[in-house]
Amino acid sequence: MLNLNHSSEYITVKRERVLSWLSEHVPQSRIDHILRVEQMAVELAEHHRQNVEKAAMSGLMHDLAKYFKPAKLLEMARVEGLEIDPVMELHPHLLHADVSAIVARDTFGVQDEEVLQAIANHTLGRPEMTELSCIVFLADSIEPGRGDTPELQALRQMSYQNLSQAVWRTCDYSLKFLIETHCLIHPRTIATRNWFLNWVKSKHHSPHMLK
């Protein structure tokens, strides 16, 4: 059960308003996933001494645009001036993270850039992500509803030990799946994996990444 000491911004966002909006735009199974991501993001934020309310906000709103039609995703991305590469043209659903951040800003008035970036980065990641972005990226990838394989169990444990290592290991896990299922791989997933792998190797003595 989510338990937060609500900050003024989180009250302004009005969690119940977001949940009401979600109930009209995504199926219940997706809401269940969103709530699990929100909860896991909060737990990881608490463990890593990050802002819990920002983690909750990011988790709650990370999939706002998940069920937008491809044409709408592309249109909103173009209006925003986002880079749309050939992989995204072929698979516009990859834009749902960036578009979810637009919805969080324009519909729910979220102004915190770190929260918006955490929402935007939750699918493909990004080199040099903040710890908040790492937390939401991981929470989305390894929340309990994703399964209970030995690989996922190891990634969950790693997420509490070392965020940077967990990010690149999770990228490896995703890349393996994409290769086995013959899916296109977005370059940003590889760039994210390489950056965090290099960071861990060069800063192996540090339990955390750069702020």
Image (tube, helix red, strand yellow):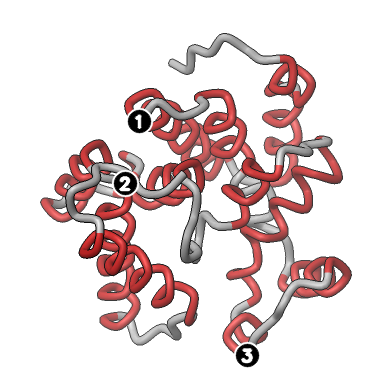
Left/right of residue 101 with respect to residue 151 in the rendered view: right
Which residue is nearer to you in this view: 160 or 178?
160
Q: Residue 48 shows which numbered tag?
A: 1
Q: Which tag, 1 or 3, sits closer to the chain's start?
A: 1
**Image quarter of the N terminus:** top left
* Separation of marks 2 and 1 at Cα, in angstroms: 9 Å
Which amino acid lies under the numbered mark 2 shown in the image of this protein? Leu
Q: Which of the 4 image quarters holds residue 47?
A: top left
Assess disc 1: are there few (<14), some (14-19) or many (≥20) residues with their C-alpha within 10 Å of its C-alpha.
Answer: many
Q: With respect to residue 187, does 139 lie above or below? A: above
- Mark pair 1, 3: CA separation: 37 Å
Do the numbered discs 3 and 2 sit on residues whose CB atoms are within 8 Å?
Answer: no
Of the numbered discs 3 and 2, the one sitting upstream in the chain is 3
Q: Position of residue 11 (x, y in %)?
A: 73, 16
Residue at 74% x, 39% y is: 24
Q: Which residue appears at 57% of the width and 9% of the height? A: 5
Residue 120, relative to residue 144: is it above or below? below
Disc nearest the viewer among 1 and 3: 1
Rendered location of residue 34, percent (x, y)? 52, 39
Q: Residue furthest left?
A: 150
Marks 2 and 1: CB-CB under 8 Å? yes
Q: Which residue position is annotated with label 3?
A: 86
Mark 2, residue position: 163
**Nearest the eye: 181 or 12:** 12
Q: Residue at x 45, y 38 (%)?
A: 37
Q: Is residue 149 left or right of residue 55?
A: left
Mark 2 neighbour density, 10 Å: few (under 14) some (14–19) many (20 or more) = many
